[in-house]
């Protein structure tokens, strides 16, 4: 497939009477990935917001909808990208699918080759961002499971701290590279991912909108004292380990071991999101494959599962004090992406 530009719709300064009164009505106005331009008070600078890279994560779209309804003018020119529109609309319900079944996850396509539909969308978006040379980019998401908000960046510096703290006081600094938008490092601008909380949590929508407003309206993101925030002001997680299930693993969530499942996690396992858990904590139960059902990879691809977990009887036990995050009970996402991340305390 030749790398022709993918048809991304351009929409300049949409008005409140064009977008519908509800989030669902706004989604209905979108026919394909859309690049929106809002003229700012200072048109010598710009910022970029991307969202809906996953079709089941509506908080960023909600924030943009509310922003248009507010009739406010951003401090600088502002560009917003709405990505997986077709996934968000795909049956059986709005905001049900992370990506269209059988197609690639758009937020794993920001590295070559750009040789399918999602790859072409990603390449087009990167071209648009680099063309406008923003001073900052935020990518708004919802977490796959229930849990508090946090930000993610690929390096720890004052720009990432300044942007992330517009939304949350938790920051994950990762050296894992998965092909997500924040992996792109060829520009002179920072890209920060914002995870607002669960997709069905009204507080996540509110956080996305309030943070979006601060990002859009703050005259100087890296001045006025914002860039003086110290790492001591934030809950910092560095170099997380990605815990995945081996292909073909059977997963369940219950209050006791499920017969036939290779791993059963506690029904309320999401309560551990971003809370410290002590060495010796029982997370669930393993089947006949034992720890071979899991892999815990670092950025170099090395597996550390036996360093962090052990089997006592058939129980999955932590071997040291940890913080877990991005725990999801969505079985499809846990199987296709990852089960959770961890960072040693």
Image (cartoon, rainbow, N blue to C red):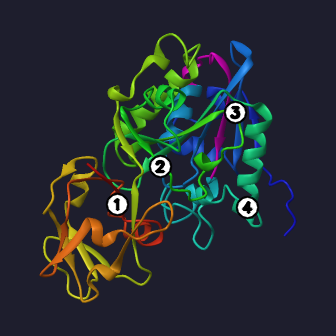
Which residue is disc 1 drawn over?
A: 328
Of residue 229 and residue 52, the one placed in the foreground of this image is 229
Q: Are marks 1 and 2 in contact (CB under 8 Å)?
A: no
Start and end of the magenta stretch? 69-83
Looking at the image, is mark 4 or mark 2 earlier in the sequence? Answer: 4
Which residue is disc 4 drawn over?
A: 112
Distance from label 4 to label 1 (Cα)? 28 Å
Distance from label 4 to label 2 (Cα)? 21 Å
- Compared to residue 11, the image places residue 329 above or below, namely below
Distance from label 1 to label 3 (Cα)? 34 Å
Which residue is disc 3 drawn over?
A: 188
Badge 4 density bin: few <14, some 14–19, many ≥20, Cα 10 Å: few
Q: Is residue 32 left or right of residue 94?
A: right
Residue 246 in picture, x, y percent from top left? 41, 79
Which residue is disc 2 drawn over?
A: 174
Q: Nearer the viewer, mark 4 or mark 2?
A: 2
Q: Is residue 78 magenta?
A: yes
Looking at the image, is mark 3 or mark 4 earlier in the sequence? Answer: 4
Q: Are marks 4 and 2 in contact (CB under 8 Å)?
A: no
- Quarter of the view holding residue 279: bottom left
Q: Is residue 10 visible?
A: no
């Amino acid at each position: 497939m030749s790398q022709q530009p993918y048809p991304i719709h351009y929409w300049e300064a949409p008005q409140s009477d064009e977008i519908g009164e509800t989030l669902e009505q706004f989604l209905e106005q979108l026919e394909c990935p859309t690049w929106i331009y809002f003229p700012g008070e200072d048109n010598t600078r710009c910022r970029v917001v991307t969202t809906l890279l996953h079709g089941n994560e509506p908080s960023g779209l909600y924030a943009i909808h509310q922003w248009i309804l507010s009739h406010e003018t951003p401090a600088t020119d502002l560009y917003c990208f709405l990505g997986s529109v077709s996934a968000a609309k795909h049956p059986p319900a709005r905001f049900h699918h992370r990506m269209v079944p059988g197609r690639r996850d758009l937020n794993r396509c920001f590295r070559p080759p750009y040789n399918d539909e999602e790859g072409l969308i990603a390449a087009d978006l990167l071209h648009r961002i680099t063309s406008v040379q923003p001073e900052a980019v935020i990518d708004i998401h919802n977490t796959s499971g229930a849990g508090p908000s946090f930000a993610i960046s690929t390096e720890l510096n004052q720009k990432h701290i300044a942007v992330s703290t517009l939304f949350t006081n938790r920051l994950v600094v990762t050296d894992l590279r998965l092909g997500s938008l924040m992996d792109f490092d060829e520009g002179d601008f920072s890209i920060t991912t914002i995870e607002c909380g669960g997709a069905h949590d009204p507080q996540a929508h509110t956080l996305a909108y309030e943070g979006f407003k601060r990002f859009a309206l703050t005259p100087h993101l890296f001045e006025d004292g914002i860039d003086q925030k110290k790492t001591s002001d934030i809950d910092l997680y560095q170099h997380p380990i990605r815990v995945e299930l081996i292909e073909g693993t059977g997963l369940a969530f219950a209050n006791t071991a499920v017969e036939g499942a290779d791993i059963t996690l506690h029904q309320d396992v999401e309560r551990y999101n971003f809370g410290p858990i002590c060495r010796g904590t029982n997370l669930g139960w393993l089947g006949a494959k034992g720890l071979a059902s899991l892999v815990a990879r670092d950025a170099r691809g090395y597996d550390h599962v036996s360093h962090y977990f052990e089997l006592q009887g058939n129980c999955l036990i932590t071997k040291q004090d940890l913080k877990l995050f991005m725990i999801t009970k969505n079985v499809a996402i846990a199987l296709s992406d990852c089960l959770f991340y961890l960072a040693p305390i």
